Amino acid sequence: MGLSESIRLALEGLRANKMRSVLTMLGIIIGIGAVIGILTVGNGLTGSITGSMSGLGASNIGVTLQEKDDDTGGMASMMGMINPDDDDLITDEMLDTLRERYGEYIVGIAIGESAGSGQAKDGRLYANVGLSGVNEEYQAVQNIDLLGGRWIQQKDIDGQRNVCVVSDKLVNNMFSGNISTALNSEVKIERNGEMLSFRIVGVYEYEASAMGYSMASEKDISTAAYLPISTAKHITGAPDGHSGITIQASSDIDSQAMASVIEDFLNHFYRNNKDYSVIAIAMSSMVESLSSIMNTLSIAISIIAGISLLVGGIGVMNIMLVSVTERTREIGTRKALGATNNDIRVQFVVESIIVCLIGGFIGIVLGTLLGYMGSSLLSEPSYPTAGYIILAVGFSMAIGIFFGYYPANKAAKLDPIEALRYE
């Protein structure tokens, strides 16, 4: 009996027992669908996060203070878990010296400092904001798009002016989305019970970050209001130095190598500091590390989800054993008519493979749909790669062969006389 005949008999057997066949496939469908869906969502999540980080500047270098006994790679400083004294901070003089030494490799230096959070109010209208003091180069380095007006200028910083650049979300809440009306208007922001007044000089386009996902409604979402850094320091009473900065390196140099150069250079100023040193991390290295972590996490979760494939395979074996028992007389008849042990074995293995392939195909379609919907929620629609689909098909065939062989072998070894007598 040829392979085509075995496939025909297998399909007839599946059609004769439709409900049982569907239930047999269910474990395979769920397992393949879960693995494909998780890997697809993982790709979307990785793309969304790395895209957001890359959007901040692929050649950017984050420079922060680090406690000398800190072995977390600067994580404590990036999370604001350090409390340096005024004398420990990075000074403007250090940055000026850095520019003089490596100015040809540095496009800009962004300085930003939080001045707390508050709420812009005008009668019943409101918008949640986070106050952030910045320098003139902050916009270019952090890739912020202006929709109208201008950015913070050096004259604003020198004059410690009460001006601000707000988001289009604030303009939507308080000025009915009219940017022209918002520009040069006064906005009052309540911060810690104190009412601060600023003149709006610019409006920027707000972009949600995957690293800062918020469950707040569109109206209640908090966006940054950028102030001159001198004004922000005056509000908070902060010292003149900085605990962290962002440096944009030239695109034609290796940012990771430049990060090491900057770190070594600035640490000359900290060689006599007993508590703190400087650590510089290139954004590109952070993106690579994060991508690796996300890929590993997706694979780990997929392996856990793949356990359902094992359960599905056991289900296939169980149903095939039942099928062998039910079709004992048929097997005896076929052997009596000249079918060999190998013919019987191939028939049942092919039937098992077909069950798993059909279940795998349905699982791929289901996983693709779930993965696409899940990744779309992350604003990074994604489809499974060809590698995932090939892996799913191969795995389905492997399950069919592995879990179908034992029942097939049992059927092949049946004695034809005893099989014909079976009731």
Image (tube, rainbow, N blue to C red):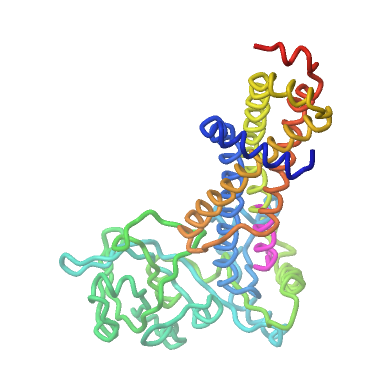
Q: Which residue is drawn at 79% across and 30% down?
A: 345
| Position of the C terminus by quadrant | top right
| Residue 40 falls in image quadrant | bottom right
| Position of the N terminus by quadrant | top right
* Rendered position, 236 above or below 335: below
Which residues are drawn in magenta?
A: 278-293
Residue furthest out toward the front? 337
**x and y percentages locating residue 3 in the rendered image:** 77, 43
* Rendered position, 221 above or below 293: below
**x and y percentages locating residue 124 in the rendered image:** 16, 65
The main secondary structure of the magenta stretch is helix
**x and y percentages locating residue 283 in the rendered image:** 65, 68
Viewer-side residue, 302 vs 62: 302
Viewer-side residue, 279 vs 283: 283
| Residue 56 falls in image quadrant | bottom right
Q: Position of 344 compared to 126: left or right?
A: right
Q: Position of 122 compared to 11: left or right?
A: left
Task: Look at the image and tell me whether residue 233 can be seen.
Answer: no
| Residue 35 falls in image quadrant | top right
Task: Look at the image and tell me whether residue 103 can be seen.
Answer: yes
* Rendered position, 100 above or below 373: below
**What is the number of callouts on the image?**
0
**x and y percentages locating residue 273 in the rendered image:** 69, 61
Q: Residue at x 45, y 58 (%)?
A: 377
Examine the structure image and report whether residue 153 is included in the region drawn in magenta: no
Q: Position of 221 compared to 3: left or right?
A: left
* Rendered position, 145 above or below 34: below
Q: Which residue is drawn at 57% across and 41% down?
A: 29
Examine the structure image and report whether residue 281 is included in the region drawn in magenta: yes
